[in-house]
Image: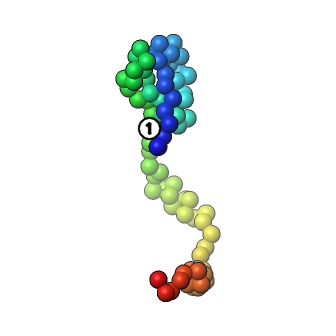
Amino acid sequence: MTIMAEVSIRDLRNHGGDVVDRAARGEHLTITRRGKPVAELRPLAPPPAATSELIRRRSHLPSVDTKKLRADIDALIDRSL
């Protein structure tokens, strides 16, 4: 559950840039009129990474010894389940 802060329409009008900056930083805001909720302001999801960026990130990951990984997993799992 996300806790939303309330911002009055007056505050939105008078401090719109600051309110939008709060949303851009990840805050979920409920806009109120005369104390009653009328709208929500929330950050947009970031755009997906480009394929080239994903490939670049992948190249920086450490290599994995799959046989050792499997042995470690087997040692942790209760085979009686």
**Percent of width and height locating residue 54:** 50, 58
| Coloration of the structure image | rainbow
Residue at (50%, 15%) from the top-left corner? Answer: 11
Q: Is residue 42 above or below residue 75?
A: above
Residue at (56%, 59%) from the top-left corner? Answer: 57
Near-viewer residue (6 or 55): 6
Residue at (54%, 28%) from the top-left corner? Answer: 21
Near-viewer residue (7 or 53): 7
User: How many numbered circles does the render carry?
Assistant: 1
Dot 1 lies on which element?
loop
Left or right of 25, for residue 47: left
Q: Is residue 5 above or below residue 50?
A: above
Q: Is residue 80 above or below residue 18?
A: below
Near-viewer residue (72 or 78): 78
Q: Residues within 10 Å of mark 1 (few under 14, many from 20)?
A: few
Q: Is residue 66 visible?
A: no
Going by the numbered disc 1, the residue's amino acid type is Leu
**Percent of width and height locating residue 31:** 43, 23
Image quarter for residue 38? Answer: top left
Near-viewer residue (58 or 6): 6
Left or right of 65, for residue 80: left
Image quarter for residue 72? Answer: bottom right
Q: Residue furthest left?
A: 38
Q: Is residue 57 above or below residue 23?
A: below
**Percent of width and height locating residue 48:** 44, 49
Image quarter for residue 37? Answer: top left
Residue position marked by numbered label 1 in the rendering: 44
**Percent of width and height locating residue 4:** 49, 33
Q: Is residue 11 visible?
A: yes
